[in-house]
Amino acid sequence: MNYEATIRTGIQPAIEPAMGDVDLGSGGSGRGRMAIVAVVVALVLALGWYLMHKAPAATDAASARNAQAQSVSVIAPGRTSVTGTITASGTIAARREMPVGIAGEGGRVISVLVDAGDWVRAGQVLAVVDRSVQAQQIAGQAANIEVQRANARIAQANLDRALKLVERGFISKADVDRLTATRDAAVAQVQVAAAELGQLRASSARLNIVAPAAGLVLTRGVEPGQIVSPGSGVLFRIAKDGQFEMQARLAENDLARLAVGQAAEVTPVGTSSPFTGQIWQLSPTIDAQTREGIARIALAYDRALRPGGFASAQIRSGSVTAPMLPESAILSDQTGPFVYVVGQGNKVERRAVKTGDVTAQGIVIAEGLSGDERVVMRAGGFLNPGDVVRPVVASAAASTPRPGS
């Protein structure tokens, strides 16, 4: 509808009669003034009607569009310096565990001198095995040495006398050679007997179960009266120097981000206080079934650390400066993770991203955002690229996830 034409149509009938009645003489001055006033009033009324009907019609379309737009919370993440952390789980173990068994022939255990939890030094006797038979063998061999030494002395004396008689011609050179050989054989018998005695003493000493190195006794598997032999297996387990470690199992991509010397916080199950350690070895191989490797975290001795116990670890993997978003802002489909960004004209745009470390404050965005964008915080699943929205800037408290959420 043409509002200007309507105004002209309404004004024209009011103007023409009024103008026709205007008399320039003194008698028509009152009627002329009244006609002019009527025209002005008609113009004012027409203008008011025009403004009341056209202006709202022009704003109704914009109001309708705004009413249809969905309100969404948005944040501008900026860039934050984040210390990367990798979470892993595993078991506590001795860094160098030494299994100790019987080294000699074995026998009956007559005493056990240490228990689990005791500290021992290198060479310390852990358990004593009965050696009464071996003691008799050692005594017999020691007596045999004395016999052989006596035979050697007689052979030497016979040789000395023969050498004196050779000069007078009473003994031939052949007799002297025979006596020399007898003396040499007697001396050799002494050495053989001495070697056999040493062997018996060494075998007897090996009956004792001793610590191969200093450390902490972890387990004890023998009791007095028990018969032990080389087939008895492990009788004691010792943590060398009392050094412990956590064997953290990690996915191969996380293992590739670590290096020897990086710090870690280890928290055993049942304790609330973490223990500080550092990686001393990374597994050179990956398990073909689980696709995991092991990071070995060295730990100092503490009574709260029990080998075989379960623990979790937080391993620092370096610092990065990148945008960080709450978990609710990140969506994912078959093409990967993405976010919705509010662009020009408040239109929604889809933006593919690459996520990084997960922290208590949010998820690091490694690629895809500069940090200056307006990112939809929630309700992203109900949006489509190109939708017009009404962005509402979220407060910092609302955008920060609560611990454990």
Image (tube, rainbow, N blue to C red):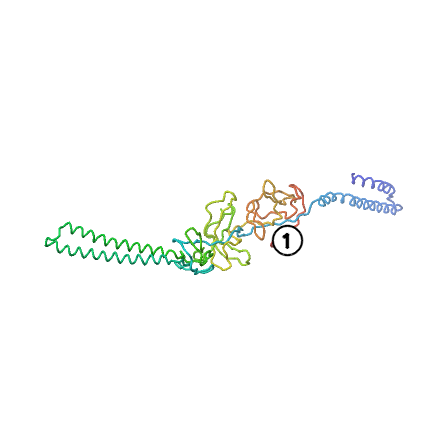
Residue 164, position as x, y percentages in the image: 13, 56
Q: Left or right: where does residue 286 sit relative to residue 45?
A: left
Camera-nearest residue between 200 and 82: 200
Residue 323, position as x, y percentages in the image: 57, 49
Residue extending farthest right: 27
| Total count of labels | 1
Camera-nearest residue between 159 and 326: 159
Q: Amino acid at mark 1?
A: Ala
Label 1 environment density (alpha carbons within 10 Å; few <14, some 14–19, many ≥20): few
Element at badge 1?
Answer: helix
Quarter of the image with the N terminus is: top right
Q: Left or right: where does residue 6 sit relative to residue 215?
A: right
Residue 358, position as x, y percentages in the image: 56, 50
Establish if 382 lies above or below 236.
above
Label 1 belongs to which residue? 398
Q: Is residue 400 visible?
A: no
Camera-nearest residue between 296 and 338: 296
Camera-nearest residue between 331 and 161: 161
Q: Is residue 362 visible?
A: yes
- The answer to which quarter of the image holds residue 156 is bottom left
Residue 343, position as x, y percentages in the image: 63, 44
Residue extending farthest left: 168
Residue in view at x 85 percent, y 40 percent: 13
